[in-house]
Image (cartoon, grey):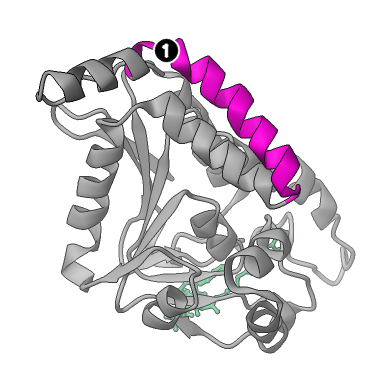
Amino acid sequence: LVLVERSADSAVAVIRLNRPQQLNALTADMLVQLREAVEQAGADPAVRALLLTGQGRAFCAGQDLSDPLVAPTPDQPDKDIGHLINHYYIPLVQSLRHCAVPTVCAVNGVAAGAGVSIALGCDLVIASDAANFILGFNKIGLIPDAGATWLLPRLMGRAKALELALLGDKLSATDAELLGLIARTVQADQVLPQALATAERLAALPTRALVQTRKLIDGAMESNLDIALRAESRMQSQLGFSFDYAEGVTAFQQKRPPQFRDR
Ligand code: LHQ
């Protein structure tokens, strides 16, 4: 359900959703495998960046709506979908957001429902120009979940977030880029090579500093300038003692490329 590869001589863990016939719709087993893959990549000292993508024509169609866990039946009309959210989605979203290495999502095709939330939960989102983003929750009587209500207004502002969430229309990758929802749109055949090249660039950079940058930027959304200034100062002081800082400055002085190794 989830494939994990390490590209040759690369510090990038490539995690691939692998249920292409169902457009990589997420089952409970798949959610567990995905979370485990993210956690293992983050815990592996040899991994310095993570790339998430989908096998086949879609990135991810969100929750598998035929999974007995969520599909109401005449004899079981009430489903406790809160359980699925608490035990499967929340840990997954948290593992991505707090991953010990930078994360890139290659949105190779349509992303729907929680598939949108998972893509946008990554640090850099690079999408195929043939991809679309569809929240779709409104069509099944639900609210956007897996972090979408938190992410969307931060990424695109309240007006556009509400338009996307309330009407549920599909948003092209090109419009998603224009609205600031994703980092970049590229030609369909370039999405994986470019996402991999970007992940490799990230892997060569000072991991701890990158991950702390993510943490400070996320924290800054909740705070004010004075709090952010102090948080930056605390983190900068710590990084000042790191190998990568000494290496970066020395490499600059010696006019050579740095060899970062902190994690
Ligand atoms: C699917 C799915 C799918 C099963 C395509 N499930 N089979 C929800 C509930 C509970 C707790 C936690 O949180 C959530 C979060 C959510 O993610 S809710 C939102 C769930 N996702 C959706 O509502 C999207 C449903 N899918 C679609 O709207 C379309 O399939 C999209 C727009 C993604 C793609 O459309 P097409 O390109 O026209 O493909 P298709 O619809 O023909 O799909 C191909 C196959 O994949 C098809 O199966 P079949 O056997 O007929 O070939 C679909 O049934 C299956 N599939 N999404 N979520």
Q: Nearer the viewer, residue 217 or 127?
A: 217
Q: Is residue 130 magenta?
A: no
Q: Nearer the viewer, residue 206 or 70?
A: 206
Number of labels in the image equals: 1
Q: Is residue 164 left or right of residue 25?
A: right
Q: Going by the image, does 148 lie left or right of 187?
A: right
* Disc 1 target residue: 242
Secondary structure under the numbered disc 1 in the rendered image: loop
Task: Decide which of 39, 33 is in the foreground and name it.
Answer: 39
Q: Does residue 220 appear anywhere in the picture?
A: yes
Start and end of the magenta stretch?
222-244
User: Residue 63's x, y, as percent?
Assistant: 61, 61
**Is 110 situated left or right of 258 in this image?**
right
Q: Residue at x 37, y 75 (%)?
A: 131
User: At label 1, which amino acid type do we have?
Assistant: Ser
Determine whether 242 is above or below 189 in the image: above
Query: Image quarter for residue 154?
Result: bottom right
If the picture is divided into quarters, which one holds ligand 1? bottom right
- Can you give x and y, in whole percent of width and height, for residue 241 in the image? 46, 10
Image coordinates of residue 263 in percent, x first then y, are 41, 19
In percent of the image, x 58 and y 66: which residue is there? 155
Asked if residue 107 is positioned above or below residue 204 in the image, the reply reads below
Question: In the drawing, does residue 232 fall left or right of residue 33?
Answer: right
- Pinpoint residue 41: horizontal percent, then vertical percent: 42, 27
What residue do we see at 68% from left, 56% from top?
Answer: 147
Q: Judge whether 115 appears above or below 5 on screen.
A: below
